[in-house]
Image (spheres, coloured by chain):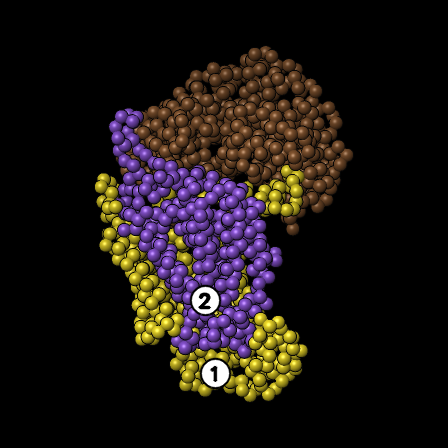
Amino acid sequence: MTADPIAPPLRGSSSVASTERGTPPERTSSNRASTSHATTWLPRNLHPIAWWIWALGLVVAASRTTNPFLLLAIVAAAGLVVMRRRGTAPWAKAFRWYLLFGVIIVVIRVATRGLLGGGAMGGAHVWFTLPRVPLPRWAAGITLGGPVSGEAVVAAACDGLRLATIIVCIGAANALANPKRALRVLPGALEELGVAVVISITVAPQLVAGVQRVRRARRLRGGADRGFRVLRSITLPVLHDALERSLALAAAMDSRGYGRRSVTSPTTRRLTVALLLGGLAALCVGVFGLLGGGTAPAVTTPAILAGVTCCAAGLWTGSRRVRRTAYAPDPWDVPESLVVLAGVVCAAVFVVAGGSIHGMQFGVATLRWPTLPLVPLVAVALAATPAVTAPRPPVRRVRASDPRGRSGDVAPIGATA
Amino acid sequence: MTGRVRPLRSGGARSGDAIVIPLGGWSRVALVGASALGIVAFCWPFLIDTRSVGDTSIAPLVFGVLLLLVLGVGVAQMSEGGIDAKALALLGVLSAINAGLRPLGAGTAGIELVFFLLVLAGRVFGPGFGFLLGCTSLFASAIITGGVGPWLPYQMFGAAFVGLGAGLLPRCRGRREIVLLAAYGFAASYVYGLLLNLSFWPFVVDPGSTTAYVPGAANWFNLRRYLVFDSVTSLGWDTLRALTTAVAIALTGSAILAALRRAGRRAAFTAPVEFRPADDGASPPVGRDQLPSGYMRVPRSEVFSEK
Amino acid sequence: MIDFERVTVTYDGASVPTLCDASFSVPEGELCLVVGSTGSGKSTLLGAVNGLVPRFTGGVLAGRVTVAGRDTARFHPRDLADIVGVVAQDPLAGFVTDTVAEELAYCMEQLAVPPSAMRKRVEEIVDVLGLADLRDRALAELSGGQQQRVAIGSVLAAQPSVLVLDEPTSALDPTAAEDVLAAITRLVHDLGLTVLMAEHRLERVVHYADSMLVLDGTGSVTHGPVAAMLADSPVAPPVVELGRLAGWEPLPSSVRDARRRAPELRERLAGRPVPGRGGARRVAHRADRSTGHAALSARGIVVRYGDLVAVAGVDLSLDAGSITALMGRNGSGKSSLLWALQGSGPRDAGAVDVAGADPGLLDPRGARAHVALVPQTPSDLLYLDSVAEECAQADRESGVPAGRTAELLGRLAPGIAPTCHPRDLSEGQKLTLVLAIQIAPSPPVVLLDEPTRGLDYGAKRRLADVLDGLAAQGRSIMIATHDVEFVARVADRVVLVAEGAVVADGPCEDVVVSSPAFAPQVAKILRPDPYLTVDQVAASLEGIGEVR
């Protein structure tokens, strides 16, 4: 279980090479060299992590208020940034599904309250009354139908809107951040996970094409068109192809240097295992403290914090076994910081103001228009600034003579959903 | 040291399948911890003292982040010694199939085929592989379809344990194996649906509704409310999914198992590797799969070969 | 640079070694061709260079393989990545990422090359291989030749001194293959790489090679200069076979060499009648052929995909007992036409008549009883676990007595074990199996889409014999192919399509000899005499040719 006794001559030379080549500090310095201030604002992909932090800032902000105007403002801010700064990739088009999903959440919330609420919330303004449906004994306590009051509907809609806003913010990050680039910032300890996902993203479209091909070929043998035999006759050729391809791929990866590792000392490895498992144990202690089993809350929070820290540290030390560099890494520059700042400041204002500023929580005791507090509104406006401060996504470089690329050659700005 | 621990042998493995990704002792510890946390994250409405959690509709998001971290730890621990290129390519390609099957099913009334291949591959390639395949399948599918959301950690976690469980099923072959796997597929997709709904129940349903989660209420009270919610919203869907999974396994399982086992044989996970000098047999081998990089990995002969 | 010392490779479970006591040494800067028929151990030899054999495949390697001084027993393939670059047959299967630039950088990322150096090297590679315009493109939308050049580029990025290519063009069409081979020869000349290449299109590369490694199928390997090795290599391009026949010394390796010697041969042939192609056996059948009765007649076939017109109003009639070659560039509508004729593919206008029925209007079972089609990837049709099961299933599907397909297969390709898994067969055997399945219901018309892709000389010869036999039974056969030599060997008639329309249609000799792109080597050498194959020349010299 120790290093190979026959230390090959390469080891020495390659470790020399690795010190003179691929060390992280050199990477950043080379970035500096290639990214001067003039190029900072040129069209390029913003660092995916910056988009995610920004979006999570909006999520935190949205979770602190029930004021529908503020929530709609957050949705508008996220939507504006998406409209102005998303690329032409398929994931960028998924934003509308998140909007739709948000609408569905609001509808479900209102519907469940209206149908199943049974007027539990009361409310003075009864709009109409649904007929009560008697339910069997085992469903005692659950009512179907009954009076539907304006207060109940509005409260359900506002609450639903808050959750919908959270979903839309995550959708915004999804549309803006390139997921393949985000995979590259996975810690080295999870490198294999990232590689497997990259492979499947590469292979999946080819498999879909394969299914279509086999399906078409199926007719040639004149076999049945329906039933599970067809499933078998389509699945198996595709599966066999895929499995054979995986072997070819593995050989290609092996001979192209996949899995080269840096020499990690047994101590580092033990430390990694200890940190990961220790962190997990601490998390268990912390979470079980939440179960009301009598663990003092004084233990709960520190245990969770310690667990998170240990796990993160374990992932960090575990990453040291991987020795590889990244081609054209995304730089972290002024625009990234501005985007992150916009999100974080917005979240901070909402967290701080949550309790103190009037109008953050929307009471529905009486049906009246909510007020619109100024400070949080300004914070939301700030959160919309990436629409301007982030660089535009790059346009795919395509020669005019190439008909295939022309469809991709659309100006990214103002691309309609 | 993980390498010294005897790899976890599942039923599948004992019956001659290759364990593609060995589960060392520490990995098993990590998985136990992860599953404990997972149970809390999925079933918290029934487990947790709600006084210690501020906002119950946000709790699924917080637990989602926690699950992500726990999954990260599990995967990091499992791949700590590095994963063989063959296993990784297999993982990538199979999760591509799964990711491709998923949108195929979503359109056609509840035919959900994700678990179908996951169960079969977990069975053939062992619990560690099943676990990772569950993670990567759902992750890849979310990225391909742009469906990254707060539900993703739950889906990944659920699928990972479905794959792990498939690898741990007891040994048997032939018709009995298919029946076992079909039954497992049925049960697993049911439980998966039930738990996934549970974790998002407080998020989706309005607290004012009579099927809503009531923080602090007695468990049986909430359980009844949940079952009503589930049967109204997704029981039909879950049943259909469980049925299609079971039927698909029953009808194509043996052919697909054979294809996967054949791939395992062709990949020569278990074939011994040997270098020896030109004079056949006279002198002992010069080296048996020596690993020059100097990093520590269990020699292939120890991990992969059976008996 | 590459040294094999008494190397014997035995795979796990195999009783005989695949490579047997191979010793040779390839010096630096040499382009060495690895030649042998399918299954003779070419891939094993190439895999042994960087240690994939036996580390990846399992098995026992006795002896010693060293590359640039590194012994593969002590170095893992990944640790040889910076001196040996390996490129496999199907480029698409080996891609890890999905864009050109990322794929080019992948190997360097693994070797921890710093990003600034990586940027520079990617630019260099892009220039050397002519990929500059493709840098940001998705790999899946490139043509086959472009993909293979990317695959070569991605291993070159590690700046290896040895390049190992395992049939890099076997999955490509001729234009793409030309593309790739030109890139490889440029690399040998410009960068001084040592190249070890298995390639079955010998006629394209043999004149660039410095030496040859010949595997005779028993596991033994011989290495030597090209001219010497060609004299008795088991596989040889037509130009070499013609040289052997004419007794030229040294053997020519290119058309240009041979052309200079040709006047002498033309003189010997002068006055002799040009015999029919395919030798005496074929000539006998030829008399009964071309009964004048059309097995298939099609009028005004149109196939469109949206705005793209793939087939633009083709009229075609195929005579019973004839073999027709359908030729044209990639994307000229060959496949679409075949699928439309068979009835399984889309057809927007036109009518097909086979024995009074239109296969496009019949159900799949009826259509296949009239027209059989073997698609480009024959294995798409195979889904059972053994050859015997596939044959039995085919009997059931086509409603013929049990055992019929197996018997057909036995006649077309003797010696395929019925218990064998269809996926374990060689490309040629898979093709024959699918052909047997498809012709089980005795359809009068048989269509084949690119049947020679991935076949070696021997397999092509066997396929030609099979097709001859089928035509002799009165079936009408049409093959869509790029393979000029195969067409010269087998086809009676050539139909040339471009942009979905027929641009030339006539007897093989007329269409092929006059075309610079589609002329076979023998025609190029003996022009203006209308010889197409070596067999014809041989027959003529022996004086057995009959007047056609």
Tell me if residue C48 comes above or below residue A121 in the rendering.
Answer: above
| Amino acid marked by disc 1 | Gln
Q: Residue at x 70, y 27 (%)?
A: C320
Q: Extreme front residue here?
A: A137
Q: Colour of chain B?
A: purple
Looking at the image, residue C195 sits to the left or right of residue A156; the answer is: left
Q: Chain of mark 2?
A: B
The quarter of the image holding the C terminus of chain C is top right
Instruction: Say which chain is brown.
Output: C
Q: Residue at x 25, y 28 (%)?
A: B283
Q: Colour of chain A?
A: yellow
Residue A319 picture location, percent across and down? 31, 56
Q: Extreme right residue here?
A: C356
Looking at the image, residue A196 sits to the left or right of residue C375; the answer is: left
Front in this rendered view, residue B30 or C490: B30
| Amino acid marked by disc 2 | Cys
Q: Is residue C525 visible?
A: yes
Q: Quadrant of residue A143?
A: bottom right
Tell me if residue C417 comes above or below residue A235 in the rendering.
Answer: above
Q: Chain of mark 1?
A: A
The residue that label 2 is drawn on is B43
Residue A229 picture location, percent across and down? 61, 43
The quarter of the image holding the N terminus of chain C is top left
The residue that label 1 is drawn on is A361
User: How many residues crowd around disc 2 within 10 Å: few (fewer than 14), some, or many (20 or more)?
Assistant: some
